[in-house]
Image (tube, helix red, strand yellow):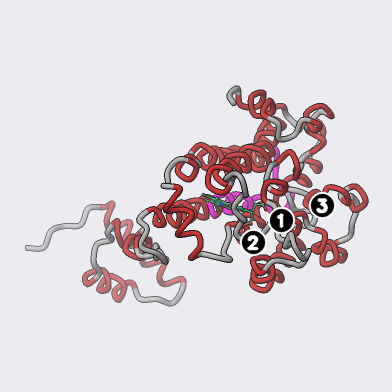
């Protein structure tokens, strides 16, 4: 004797019937499909087997896997950040901005706090050997990192420090020319010849057009513009603080944590070990030289003058 259906089930069936009928589909066929379908599993849902198959060391040194995995973890966090930024298109409200910038800060905080995995977590002897098998690849070629920067601020803020002011006001059709003046190119010029490194040339060949299109998409559509577009009354203290924290995370704290790893592995007296791209990383990487600031109007002149020096971190986060 078949069991009676409860009113709740009957009501759901009727809602489903209406749903499928609206797109010309037959509920019966879908119910039959359910009879044959397997239950969803954790490992299929998050594609675990694929995920765990994505580490392909090029050498036999076990610590190379740490290096690969931590870069992958970082790129996944970058994807989380971009997911938030993508939901701020147009003119977001102050509440929406605060919520999403808060999430992004949480991601960057996790990234900065975990960078010890690189700084202290690998055997230097292994590192110096396996890195030679990875040339000329470099985290410098992370397109997601560049996309985050471009989506956070006005494009002129990402130019070489010396030409930023001259391009403070620029048109969207100037972006292609401005790309040649972007700060990161100075991190990828060969010391001996002044030529673009292979690391940069390969990066530009793969991502140049995509990044230019992204910059055009972000013209007037970035976090700095969203803050500027808010009426004065909605520029609350918590939002101001959240944006300052984001600035400090992306332009001071993460770069400092990252720089520490370069110092740990590459700085060796008497001669420093050349960076992946043959660049002068000691002059390029430290935030106090790059002086990248997404939201300069939110900092005092003194804070800007001291950019990247340790007190900024102390004052903003209460710890060195
Ligand atoms: C032992 C660990 C690491 C060392 C020694 C290191 C070293 C370097 C060096 C020397 C550069 C300058 C460009 C070059 O010559 O290659 C660089 C750039 C960069 N690396 Fe790393 N890196 C490490 C880990 C990471 C990780 C885990 C990431 C995460 C994705 C990363 C992302 C970047 C980015 C985004 C840049 C460009 C920074 C900028 O343009 O300001 N690096 N790295």
In the rendering, at what x and y percent does residue 199 appear?
Answer: 64, 66
Q: Is residue 185 left or right of residue 146?
A: right
Residues at badges 3 and 2 in contact (C-beta under 8 Å)?
no
* Residue 68 vertical placement versus 198 (above, below): above
Q: Residue 245 lies in what quarter of the image?
A: top right
Q: Which residue is mark 3?
A: 160
Residue 25 occupies which quadrant of the picture? bottom left
Q: Is residue 82 magenta?
A: yes
Identify which residue is drawn at 61% across, 56% down: 275
Marks 1 and 3, the one that precedes in the sequence: 3
Q: Tell us which disc is closer to us: 3 or 2.
A: 2
**Which region shows up in magenta?**
79-94
Mark 3 crowdedness (10 Å alpha carbons): few <14, some 14-19, many ≥20: some
- Disc number placed over residue 173 in the picture, else none: none
Specify whether tag 1 is near ligand 1 (CB below 8 Å): yes
Q: Which sits in the foreground, 131 or 93? A: 131
Dot 1 lies on which element?
A: helix
Q: Mark 1: few, some, or many residues within 10 Å (few <14, many ≥20)?
A: many
Q: Earlier in the sequence, mark 2 or mark 1?
A: 1
Label 2, label 1: how far apart the Cα atoms are? 9 Å
Residue 146 x/y as whole percent = 66, 56
Please give the residue where the numbered disc 1 appears in the rendered image.
Answer: 187
Q: Position of residue 223 (x, y in %)?
A: 72, 46
SS at circle 3: loop
Residue under label 2: 277
């Amino acid at each position: 004797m078949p069991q009676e259906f409860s009113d709740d089930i009957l009501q759901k069936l009727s809602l489903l019937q209406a749903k499928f009928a609206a797109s010309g589909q037959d509920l019966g066929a879908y119910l039959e499909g359910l009879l044959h379908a397997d239950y969803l599993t954790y490992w299929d849902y998050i594609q675990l087997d694929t995920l765990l198959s994505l580490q392909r060391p090029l050498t036999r040194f076990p610590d190379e896997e740490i290096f690969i995995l931590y870069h992958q973890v970082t790129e996944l966090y970058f994807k989380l950040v971009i997911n938030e930024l993508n939901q701020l298109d147009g003119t977001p409200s102050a509440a929406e901005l605060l919520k999403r910038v808060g999430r992004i800060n949480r991601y960057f905080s996790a990234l900065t706090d975990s960078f010890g995995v690189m700084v202290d977590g690998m055997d230097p002897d292994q590192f110096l050997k396996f890195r030679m098998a990875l040339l000329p690849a470099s985290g410098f070629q992370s397109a997601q990192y560049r996309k985050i920067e471009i989506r956070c601020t006005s494009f002129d803020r990402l130019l070489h420090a010396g030409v930023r002011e001259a391009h403070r006001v620029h048109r969207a059709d100037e972006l292609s020319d401005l790309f040649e003046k972007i700060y990161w190119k100075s991190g990828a010029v060969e010391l001996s010849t002044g030529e673009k490194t292979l690391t940069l040339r390969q990066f530009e060949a793969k991502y140049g057009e995509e990044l230019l299109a992204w910059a055009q998409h972000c013209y007037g559509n970035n976090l700095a513009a969203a803050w500027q577009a808010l009426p004065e009354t909605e520029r609350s203290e918590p939002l101001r603080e959240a944006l300052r924290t984001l600035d400090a995370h992306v332009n001071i704290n993460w770069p400092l944590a990252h720089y520490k790893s370069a110092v740990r592995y590459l700085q060796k007296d008497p001669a420093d070990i050349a960076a992946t791209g043959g660049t002068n990383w000691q002059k390029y990487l430290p935030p106090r030289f790059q002086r990248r600031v997404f939201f300069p109007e939110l900092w005092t002149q003194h804070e800007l003058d001291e950019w990247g020096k340790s007190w900024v971190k102390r004052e903003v986060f209460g710890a060195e």
